[in-house]
Image: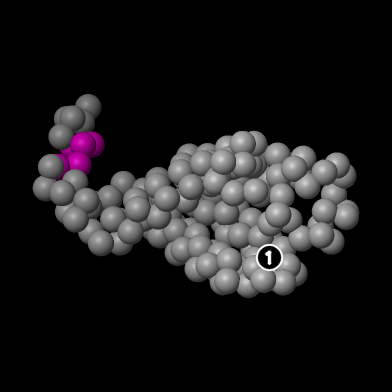
């Protein structure tokens, strides 16, 4: 039978992990990419922050069933699920968010006057990919630094 200290990381080891800049970046990005999609997804049902249907390209509105607002309800569900996926399984969830952002970028690039928002979302996509790479190292593995 092993002693409890042989399976529990030491306080010094935990401090080393918490002071690791890579781990700090992972925690920051994980929190951001979990919370933001959930909040923005919830807002798709309320339109408090912005009139979300205005961000749906007309050609996409033409091919999805229902109204643009109904499409935003579906978008909201996807975003909530993506945020939860990042919170629970960041190695998978961050790739889901990156893929979703790629779709959003394509949508925005087809709406004249929304190129600045598409560019911002390219930055978010890069952050989601960075989170995926950091999650490969830091999530689900015992840290022994």
Q: Quadrant for the C terminus, please.
A: bottom left
Q: Residue extending furthest top?
A: 1
Work out whether 112 lies above or below 35.
below
Q: Image quadrant of residue 122?
A: bottom right
Q: Residue at x 55, y 46 (%)?
A: 49
Residue found at x 82% / y 44%: 67
Can residue 8 be seen at all in this image of the molecule? Answer: yes
| Residue that mark 1 sits on | 108
Q: Where's residue 75, x and y in %?
A: 68, 45
Q: Position of residue 107 (x, y in %)?
A: 72, 63
State the scheme by which the image is colored. Answer: one colour
Q: Is residue 1 left or right of residue 67?
A: left
Q: Position of residue 47 (x, y in %)?
A: 62, 41
Closest to the observer, 81 or 135: 81
Residue 92 shows in the view: no
Looking at the rendering, the stretch of residues picked out in magenta corresponds to 6-10
Q: How many marks?
A: 1
- Is 102 part of what is drawn in magenta? no
Q: Residue at x 22, y 27 (%)?
A: 1
**Secondary structure mostly seen in the magenta stretch:** loop
120 up-or-down from 139: above or below: below
Q: As drawn, is 58 to the left or to the right of 35?
A: right
Residue for point 59% across, 49% down:
50
User: Residue 73's spot in the image, x, y percent?
Assistant: 70, 39
- Answer with left or right where residue 2 lies relative to residue 85: left
Residue 140's quadrant in the figure? top left
Q: Check disc 1: other Cα within 10 Å, few if <14, some if 14-19, many if 20+.
A: many
Look at the numbered disc 1 and give the secondary structure of its residue.
helix
């Amino acid at each position: 039978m092993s002693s409890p200290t042989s399976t529990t990381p030491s306080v010094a080891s935990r401090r080393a992990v918490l002071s690791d800049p890579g781990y700090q970046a992972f925690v920051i990005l994980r929190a951001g990419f979990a919370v933001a999609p959930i909040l923005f997804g919830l807002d798709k049902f309320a339109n408090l922050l912005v009139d979300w249907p205005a961000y749906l390209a007309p050609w996409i509105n033409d091919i999805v069933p229902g109204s643009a607002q109904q499409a935003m309800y579906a978008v909201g569900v996807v975003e909530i699920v993506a945020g939860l996926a990042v919170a629970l399984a960041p190695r998978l969830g961050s790739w889901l968010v990156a893929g979703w952002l790629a779709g959003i970028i394509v949508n925005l690039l087809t709406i004249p006057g929304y190129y600045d928002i598409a560019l911002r979302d390219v930055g978010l996509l890069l952050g989601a990919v960075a989170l995926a790479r950091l999650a490969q190292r830091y999530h689900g593995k015992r840290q022994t630094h």
